[in-house]
Image (cartoon, rainbow, N blue to C red):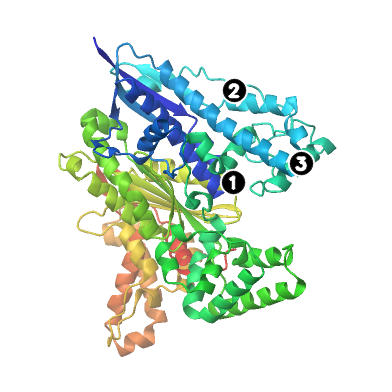
Amino acid sequence: MSERILHFTIGPVQSFIAQSRRTRDLLASSFLLSYLSGVAMHRVIQAGGTLLFPSFEIHQNGIQDDLLAAIQQAEKQAFSDWTGPWIGTLPNRFKARIPYDFHPSACVEAVQNAWQRIAKAVQTHITRELKQAEIGDTLWNRAETQMIWERQISHLWEITWAIGEEHDLLDRRKNWRTHLMPMEIGEKCSIISHYQELSGSPGKSEEQQAFWRAIHECMSEIDPDEKLSAIAMIKRLFPHVTKQAIGWRIPPAAIHIPSTLYLAALPWREKAWQQCPELVQAYGKKAGQYGLEQQDVKVHFPQLFDSLTEDSILFFKLPGEFTLSHTVENTISKHPRLSDRQKKELCHLYQQMIEKVGEPEPYYALLILDGDQLGALLRQIDAGKISRAITHFSRQMNEAVRKFKGVPIYAGGDDVMAMFPMTTALDAARHLRERYITSFAEIRREGVPATCSVAIVYAHCSTHLQEVLQYGRELLEQHAKEQSGRDSLAMGIWKRTGSEVIWTAPWEGANGQPSAVDVLTQLIQGDTKPEGTEELAITEILTNTYLKKIQTHFAHLPHFPYSSLDQGTDTPLNHKKLLETLITSDLYRLFQKQIDQNPAKKRNIQQAVRALLQVSFRSWREDGAIHLAEGEFQSSAAQFIHFLRQKGENDS
C-alpha cells in the first residue's frame, strides 16, 4: 500500500466564532480558523499528498483557492510586503490522500507553529505599543500575565485526525474527547467567559485597574469596559499584525469593517441623501471640520460611494453611533474634541434630518447559509464534483453579498456568513440560494438533491453579537433544517429583550403554487398597482394596522372543531377555510364603499387574504414532499410583514 486516506479537523468552531463582540472579532475568528486549516492542507500538499475534499484545480497562476494560494506564496516570499486575502474560504475539516510514510502529526505541528507565530506577533505588538507609550510595560511583562497568556494559547485548539476509508471516522474519533481545557481561575474575560482576564490580579484591585488602564490608553481597539483573555486579545488585534503573523498584509477593508450600528443606519443614510442632500452635506462637512472619527468603508459599498459628493462622503464615513437615534445624542454630548457650540450644531442638523426622513432603523441582519447533508452527498457523488460545485459557489459569494450592500464574514466550503442592512437581507438570501442551486446544477441533474438552508436574524444593533450568532445557529439547525425539513429559510427577530418571532418555510412551492417565501416577499414589498386602474394594491388591503389586527384578534381564535365545508373532518385545512371566510368578510366590511363602486375589488381582497393565509399556516418538507400551508396557524407571518415594511421602526 503506497497511499492512505487522511481525515483532519480543527475545532472548536461554533464557540470560537460566536465568542465575538465586534464584527471585526467575528471576521478575525472565521479567518483564523480557515487559515489554520489551510496551513494543514498546505503541509499535505508539500508532502506530495492530494486534497480530495475540498479539492482545487491548479492553473498556470496557481491553486484555485485564494487563501490556500496565499499560504503557499507567503512561504516562498518569506514575509515580504504584499496584500493578500482576508476572508476565510477554507472549511475547518478536509480529506486527503497522503503518502504512506507521511504522518498526520506533521499537520498538527504545522498548525501549532502557525498559531504560536500569530500569538507571538500580537504579543510583540502589545509590548511595543506599551513600551513606546512608556506606560504599563512592566505590568504587561509580569510573570503572572505571561503565564496566563501561554496557558490559554497552548490549550485552545482541538485537532483531530484519523486514517482510513470510512466516511464517519472523524465523528467516531471525536467521541473520544481527549482534549481537556485547563481550569481557569480569577476574574473572567469580558468576551470569553470561561477564560481568565490577562492581568491575573484580584478583581477591582488597584493593580488590575492600572493594568487595563494602560492597555486602554495605548490601544483604542480595546474598549474601556473590556478586560480580555489572550484569545480575545488576539482576535481583536490580529488585523494589525498580519504581515508578521501570516506573511501578508490585509487591506483596510478588513480593519475598517462596518459595525452592526453602521449597517443598521445605512438605509437611513441613503434615504437622507436622497431626500435632504443639503443637510447630509452640511452634517458631513461639520463632522470633517470638527475632526470626528472616519471609517474607510468605501471598499464595502463602492457603487454607493462613487455616487457621492465630497461632503456627503464624510457623512457616510461616520461611525454608526453618529447616525442612530438612541446613540447619537450621547455620542456627540460626550465627545472630548467637540465644544458646546459644535455639539449643538451637530445635534440640530441631525434633528433636521430626522424631521425630514424619520428616525433610522435600529436593526441589521445576520445571514447564515449551510449546505444540506453534505456528508450524505459525499457518499453518493464523486468528491471532485462536489468540490468544483462548492468552489464555483464560494468564488461568487463576495460579489453576491456586496450586490445587496452586505459584508462577507466567511465563505468556506458550503458555509456562508454575512451581515446586511435589514432592507436587503431577504433578497440576498434568495439570490445566494439561487447561486448555490446553480452551482450544483450538474449534480442535481443526476437526481441528487443538493440543497441549502438559510437563517436570517433581524437583530437590534445594541444586542450582544454573541447572542445573535447563537440564535442564528439555532434558527438554522433547529428550524430551517430540523422542523422545516431542510432546503428551507428560517427568519427570526432578536430584540433587546431576546427572541421575538420566528417564521420558516421551504424554498420551493408545491402543486403549481408559488413558495411561501416568494409569497411572503410579495406581501412585504407590495404589488405594483397598474396605472389607470382602480384595483386595490396588497398594501392598501393588508395595511400595517390590519396586520396588527391579525396578530391581536384572529391569531387567538379557538381552533374550529369541524366545518361543513369538509364533511365534518377535523383538519387544519378546515380552520384555514373558516379563517379565510372571516378575514375576507371583515375586509369586505371595511372596504364596503369601494366595493359598492367597483365590485371587482372583491377579487383583490380575496387574492390578498389567500396570499396571507398561505404564509400564515405552517409549511414544511417531509420525506421529499412539501406540505404547503398545511400546518397550524401562526401570526408570525403578519408580524414579519409588518416589521419588515416598517423596517424595525418604533421597535427600538
Q: In the figure, 595 relative to 280: above or below?
A: below
Looking at this view, name the residue that lies furthest to the left. 446
Above or below, comparing residue 537 to residue 427 in the picture:
below
Give the crowd class for mark 2: few <14, some 14-19, many >=20 residues within 10 Å: few
In front of the other: 285 or 178 = 285
Figure check: 230 above or below 417: above
Decide if residue 492 is on the left or right side of residue 450.
right
Q: Which residue is mark 2?
A: 181
Q: How many marks?
A: 3
Q: CA distance from mark 1 to mark 3?
A: 29 Å
Residue at point 51% right, 79% down?
277
Which x, y percent locates residue 632? 39, 53
Q: What amino acid is at disc 2?
A: Met
Q: What is the CA distance from the residue labelled 1 to the residue labelled 2? A: 23 Å
**Residue carrying label 3:** 134
Lower position in the chain sequence, tag 1 or tag 2: 1
Of badges 3 and 2, the one in the foreground is: 3
Residue for point 32% across, 45% down: 394
Whether residues under marks 1 and 2 lie with C-beta atoms below 8 angstroms apart, the answer is no
- Residue position for label 1: 21
Q: Nearer the viewer, residue 246 or 414?
A: 246
Number of the label disc, if any, that sits on residue 651: none
Determine whether the residue tagged by mark 1 lies in a helix, strand or loop: loop
Front residue of 534/265: it is 265
| Residue type, numbered disc 3 | Glu
Label 2 secondary element:
loop
